[in-house]
Image: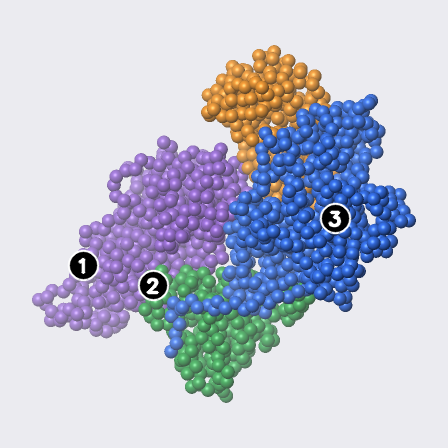
Chain colours: A orange, B blue, C purple, D green
Amino acid sequence: MKKVRAMHDEHFVIIGNGPAGNQAALTLRQKVPEARITMISAEHERFYRPHLLPDFVAGTIPENEVYAAALEHYRTHRIKLRLGQRVVAVDFSKRNLLLEHKETVRFSGLILAVGGKPRIPEPLLVFRDLLLTFKTFSDARKWIERLHRVDSVLIVGGDLTSLAVTKALLRLGKEVRFVLNEDAFRPVRCKPEVFQEAAHRLSLQGVKVLEGRKLRSVTRINEDLFEVTADRERFRVGLVGAFFGLVPHVRFLARSGLTIERGVLVDETLNTGFEGVYAAGDCAQVYHTHIRDYWVSIGHDNAVSLGRIAALNLLGEKMKAEPKGETILCDDVRVNTSWWRDF
Amino acid sequence: MKTKGAYPAENKDATVEAPAVAYSTDAADAYYMDVNVPCQSGCPAGTNIPAYIRCLFEHRYDESYQINRTANILPGVLGRICSRPCEDRCRHGELELGRPVNICHIKRAASDFRRAPLNPERISPSMEKTIAIVGAGPAGLAAAHDLAAVGIKVTLLEAFDEPGGMLKYGIPRFRLPRDVLKAEIDAILEMGIKLKTGCRVGPDVSLQELLDQHDAVLLAAGCYVPRDLGIPGEKLPGVLTGLNMMMDLEARRLPELGERVLVLGAGFTAFDCARTALRSGAEDVAICIRRTEEDFTVTEDEIFQAKKEGIRILPLMTSSRILGRDRAEGVEFLRTRPVGFGPDGRRRIEAIEGSEFVLPADSIVVAVGQKPAPFPFPGGGNSDGRLEVSPEQIQTSISRLYVAGDYRTGPSTVIEAIADGREAAERIAESLTGRIFRQTCVRQQDTKATDRERSWDYLPRQEMPTVEPAGARLEDGAVEVETGFSREQASEEAKRCYLCYLHYEIDLNRCIYCRYCIDVAPRDCIKLVSRIHLNDDGAVVGLEETANWREVNAVVIDNSRCIRCGECVRVCPVDCISVTRVERVERIHEKGASHA
Amino acid sequence: MPKLDITVEVCGMAGDGTIAAGGLINEGMSRGGLSVLAFDSYPAEIRGFGRCVTRSRIGHERRTALEEHTHVLISLNDEQSLSRVPFLTEHSAVFFDNQPPTLVPEESSLAAHVEPATALFGMPFTDLAAQAAGSDRGRNLVALGGFAAVFQVPSELFEPAIVKKFKSKGQKVVESNVRCFQAGVAYALERFSERLWDPVSFPPPKEGPEIVMLSGNTAIAEGALDAGLHLYFGYPITPATPIMEYLAKRLPERGGRLMQMEDEIASIGGVLGGFFAGKRSMTATSGPGFALMTELITHGVMSETPAVIINAQRGGPATGLPTKTEQSDLHAAVFGGPGDSARIVIAPTDVPECYHLTIKSFQLAEKYQIPVIVLTDFFLDNRVESVPLPVAEDDARKDMTVYPDPDAKERYRRFKITESGISPRALPGMEGYIFAATGLEHTEKGLPDYTPENHSKMTEKRYRKLRSALEDLPSPVEHTPRGRVDLGVIGWGSNFGSVHEAVNRACERGLKVGALKLTAIYPYHEDAIRDFMSRCDEILIAELNFEGQLANLVGHLHRKEVLRLNRVTGLPMPPSVIYKKILEILGETDS
Amino acid sequence: MKTPGPVLAEQVKRIEDSELFSFRSGRLPIWCPGCGYFGIHAGINAALKQLGIPHHKVVVVSGIGCAGRYPFFSNTYGLHTTHGRSLPVATGVKFANPELTVLAVGGDGDGLGIGGGHLPHASRKDINISYVLFDNSIYGLTKGQPSPSSPAGFKTKVSPSGTVERPLNATLMALSYGASFVARLFAGEPRLIGEILAKGIRHPGFSFLHVYTSCVTFDKQYKTWDHLKEWVHPIPEGHNPSDFRAAMDLVLDDDFATGLIYQRGK
């Protein structure tokens, strides 16, 4: 059978199968018709648009429309797509990466577009099993399945996704409580006025906002009934959703020499400091001189443009990543979001 | 005609000839130990880790403890607060082999479960030699112990009211219970050491007097002067140094800290301070660091426990000044960013111009390390009052005056200090008596057993049980957070140790190259080799592999890859694989060995 | 309930327990009432050399052919499994060991080669086995567990099968294997909970004959036993050895005797001796051994001594492809050996026929005093089918010998020339019929005689037996739509299964195509075949050999040149290949 | 450690320089890991090496079976014939070109079973070839049937209740067939094999080497490594190989004495 070509060839590897990764792959293919291009994604799902998931939950978008590209797309563009395969380590000196099943893959260029995974603050880890997060397709399906049976939902933490989900919940006629505290808008911590504004917007929508409260305990009464304590207040809800933002899926990069904070630290050209290694999407954290602060980009449109820029720079260009969308200022990082404005 | 039937009696001779023991000081063997027994060579005090783990597995807790004690003096203490350089090097932590053995906590188990009282070993009868040791911290205690052991009369001077140094005044009780500390210190003092507490060199007694009254003096006074940031506002009320905070805590005179506390610093002390602040009523505690989390020197457990208690970690910022009029109100920071790599392979960090921002705070703890106190030397010292001693030196420019521990090396870890104290003791004893009492060498003993079952390689790492944050843990600062392994947990964890002190080897004179061993090998640890590369000491540093049958000159076991599962020994048709137990040990010479 | 028809493959290195895992899948699924057709291919070579693949076609309908594609691949050795990847259907499932002992370069990684739509189920086979049983020997059981979990096959189906398989090796082995299996199930259920496939739908249990997993070789051995086999002589050779191994245990229980001889020459000698003395005897071999036997076989023809020889065909010539399948011994069986030597050649097409035609072969040999060669092949011998427990015909053990007239002892002529060609046969020990059998041409009394008329008369006599035997031989079976058809496809041996499935597919598509099954290879039913051909415009003969050996034998019966489909890949011919050929001949386009 | 680096490196270097394994082909043998054939392989190589025969002047002829694969792993001319027929073919080769060193190799099934009829004649004719019999008392290639040298009571799938036949004693056979050079050896002692085979090749006539070896995959009861190591021992001091009666007595009394048993003098 046809084996993959020998290692020494040009081989671009993209880790991640989100908007950034796919855009990067496509850009590379357009620029370099000959190169080997491989996309590796830990998820088993094929490419979908995560920002549509709330609408999917709301029932305003059918499942198939959430998917972005058919597998045919990868065949025609000769992009090797590897689903359900996890990268566990990268060796930048040898320029190869190690997959969970102990395969080693050489790369000549690498783009990290791994996105993030839901974060649960350490103090809440004890309740982990009782909290429902919202990131992947299968998360969304879990929500739908649960929402059939419950009509009251508590959102804790509060982040950009939570606003969209809340919108969906309201459309479904659910009763929504919202414990909004300084953890809101992870991966960033906001100035008070920012989430006062958010609290205001939420209450306008008929959400019961418990401002500045801390979640103290969650206990399961039965499958669809939970008792919650937020500071002194105690009440029951059918489902508790945790929205403490995303932590980038970069554990596997630890000790690889890449400096990881909330995401992979990159310069304005999205370069990681290693030749031929770039990061894009919301796992990339850039210090931006205009804003005089670090920022991460959230949302589909930003991801796409970053993916494109990373790919072009990998091929030798020197484009600078410009923040788009509305900027929320916060104490240690800024966020550029292309989609919370419409809330 | 004697035809062997199909069912011969299984009478394989069970007689095992007495295992040969050999001691070696060969450089090549030393190199071998460094490469192939990573944990022991990773330990500054050279603790014989595989040996004590094996003992613990066999529930011989006293022996396990003793093996520790001979090397690191304070096993019970280290089993809790050691910085664990060994675990970073544990082969079990190698890629695809899972996570390191929980070496440190096994050490603690040995101390928790030992029954016998501590009986410090005496190497030789007491003699008419005396020494004064200044500072009863880890280094001083270690030195005192070793010198007393060889019969030298030791006087231990301690400026504080009680011995222990940083162990007592630098580490909070919730990490190191005082009874544990006391027990092990007492055991040392029982060796006939005279302890004078509250006795400061300078005010109470001069260095010259000490030199006159003793054959030698060892300065192990540690580092007790907190370093400062050298930024405006540091002297404002509400700004504490990490060390002072710890000492105040121990002295039960910790000031009110307020709601919001910022800790500047990234070491153990910074974490101790942050967690202490939380325990004394602060609501919102954050540790501000210049780099990122992955650059911390503290253990992952430490970070996790801190976060679990609710402490925030704010990376990539460096303080530029402390704000406030008559009391500190906040800190102004600059953002930092990584730029290129330093010689140490870590990223270099630089502050970004014009990126100032402010974080408000009620108290600010500066925990950026300490330096030695200035000292009244005869003839004075250098600018910061220290003597000129190059890091290697222990003997100072003043005859019969020696230095050791943090005082010599600058701030270091406890295990390093202990190792340094012992090193000093050895040199001093040698120069006072002209004899060598201890000699580090490689002990080799033939053995048949591989002592392990293959399935043990798959056991998960035992995690240290802790008290949950809610309740006593955060209310009472004296509640030890880590509750220690149970006997079962301990020996489960002990099973995981590969026992790297076993050396596997193929005898080429008998090998028939049948590759049976390679067939059963758990990983690429046995190799078809065409050539072997040595270093100048004659130690094996490289195996040249080949897949070409004609070029296969040898089948060689690569002990740096071997996980000692023993499968190869079990299958070898011609029994040409030998197992040798090799350990770096201290040989004791009762009467002491003269030079030459 | 949608009709289930999946092919499950286990692939590994010899020594990985590949065959065992495949066997358990078959056993388990058939316990669930599904129909199973399974075929293992393993190296004749020693452990540590060569690839083992078991392919099991599992479904609601009985199948007698294997397709090329695979829906589920269980890889016990990724290096080996790589070559199977091209055969995976787009939405296939692949189970593999994600924690091999050493790192795998991209080139030889299974995961690197599968299509994205493939559902990858990575499990630490080795580690789980070692954890569960202390050694990695149970990897295959862990893998099986993964399969069971993902396809939601109830453990009640597999666990008894595991116990049954290993109980001979002792309780400890049984337990550790069960533990490995359960470890696999548990792991898969935990890790793949969100990716489980639709549960396999098992038919409701129904009454009727017991369903058993039977291989062609076992069926032959059972047939022989039920036909009253008394002596077996053999020599180890792939793929016939299992027959000997099976009989070694069973034959003595029935008062018979099995002997491993020093070679095939000795084996056939023993068979002739046994039959000469009136006991049903047989041997089984493959091409190379058969070649050694031919001289003595023709001695059986000449001396009119019965013999039953199973020729389990494998790839040739010479040592050839010991573990591959082929139908290239037809010429050797029909024509092999010195002189005009008339012998009977029959070829079963599936496992039940292996059983019944073996019985038939003893009856024919005994009645017509002639060596009977049963042509099977690697695919037929080594595949297992889930079939109703076969039951022997009443006359299976009936003595078919035509004995001489007791009242005409003095006129007894052992080789009497008769219309049927059959001469009354006396057995050593019977009083008054003393005669000599010889390999020389002989008179009716059995005395050497080389005269021209004797040789021609005797030769004719021996060939007349074949004509008479036709009525006892199974006649061709047609699977044809009424009336004329555009194309008739003829198949024999294991390959007929593929012919049949392909023709059915063509008919479903509305094409006018017919199939003809030949089990009597020599002599063959000339009239029946000609009649079939006369109703077909074109005749296609599909067989697993290069020459078209059956086409050479019966092709001349058609009024024009017959078309041939020949393949010598060493593998069975997938129905799709024949189907394509049919479309091509009829000028249809595949869609 | 046990063997200090320099010693080990020296050892390996010596092996390399001596080109001890130049008679190996590049291919790793497909014999099961642990197979005794590796030991025999090493021994044969050593002999050819010791005699300094040019590779191209050596022909190894084999039959069918695990041992039949030998030529593929030998850096010499090789001939892989049919089952049991290695000796006649080897004879042909030798007659065709007496300058060649001709080795016949094969297992016990090949040489004592199907090919058993050839050993007597090769011995009787005293053809100047060396025949190395790999005797593990089992059919390995066909996955474990009893062989002519399997002991009574040998259990296999074909002999579920144990064989009743008595085993052939190849050494004794060769002696009684009149072979002019007879040795018995053990796969675990490649050096001795090399030594004696060298003698055998130099011997002007038929030399027969009967090598005990183990099938790690299919024999768990008889010629296991453990048993062989326990049983095998050197022939007694002072045995005189040129004394046929002494040789007969030795072989009759002792099945496991290894070394040169008989060599007919000029």
The chain to which mark 3 is attached is: B
Residue located beneath label 3 in the image? B195
- The residue that appears at 25% across and 50% down in the rendered structure is C474
- Report the mark closest to the observer, 3 or 1: 3
Could you tell me how far apart the alpha carbons at marks 2 and 3 are, in whole angstroms?
A: 84 Å
Q: Which mark is residue C399?
A: 1
- The residue that appears at 11% across and 69% down in the rendered structure is C409
Q: Amino acid at mark 1?
A: Asp
Image: C565 above or below B21: above
Could you tell me if the residues under marks 2 and 3 are in contact, i.e. CB atoms within 8 Å?
A: no
In the rendered image, the quadrant that contains the N terminus of chain C is: top left
B248 or C78: nearer the viewer: B248
- The residue that appears at 54% across and 46% down in the rendered structure is B487
Label 3: how many Cα within 10 Å (few below 14, some 14–19, many 20+): some
The chain to which mark 1 is attached is: C
Image: D211 above or below B236: below
Image: A75 above or below B192: above
